[in-house]
Amino acid sequence: MEQISISEKRGANYTLLEISGSVNAYTIADLQTRAYSIIQEGNLVLDMSNVFELDSSGMGLLMGLFNAGMESEKKLYLLNMSPPAQKTVLETGFIDAFNVINSVTEVT
């Protein structure tokens, strides 16, 4: 069975969600609930270094979070994307829409 693990950390001007596992239609419910709640209040950083699958449902979640951030004047950051996650985002052509960072010190 596919699984996802999410841990949360707070920074000065962001909340970091460290994601491990598969981000797909079967696993995103908890991530979706937590992430939407966070981005309404402040900047959201998704550490994707341990994501080994990102399917179209996961990509839809990222786009939805990006849009929710725009509406609430907050930013979504994608931190340290794993090769599978980066491949999916690149294939959609939306890589330039996201704030892709290598360190939380880049959060503004």
Image (tube, rainbow, N blue to C red):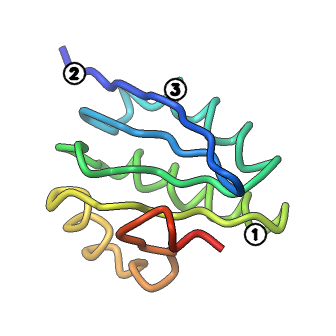
User: Depth check: 27 or 19 in front?
Assistant: 19
Earlier in the chain: of badge 1 and badge 2, it is: 2
- What amino acid is found at the position of numbered circle 3 in the picture? Ala
Quadrant hosting residue 3: top left
- Quadrant containing the C terminus is bottom right
Residue underneath mark 1: 70
Q: Is 95 placed above or below 75 here?
A: below
Q: Position of residue 54 (x, y in %)?
A: 28, 49
Earlier in the chain: of badge 3 and badge 2, it is: 2
Label 1 CA crowd tier, 10 Å (few <14, some 14–19, many 20+): some
User: Depth check: 87 or 60 in front?
Assistant: 87
Earlier in the chain: of badge 3 and badge 1, it is: 3
Residue underneath mark 2: 2
Label 3 CA crowd tier, 10 Å (few <14, some 14–19, many 20+): few
Q: Is 9 placed above or below 13 here?
A: above
Q: Farthest residue in the bottom direction? A: 96
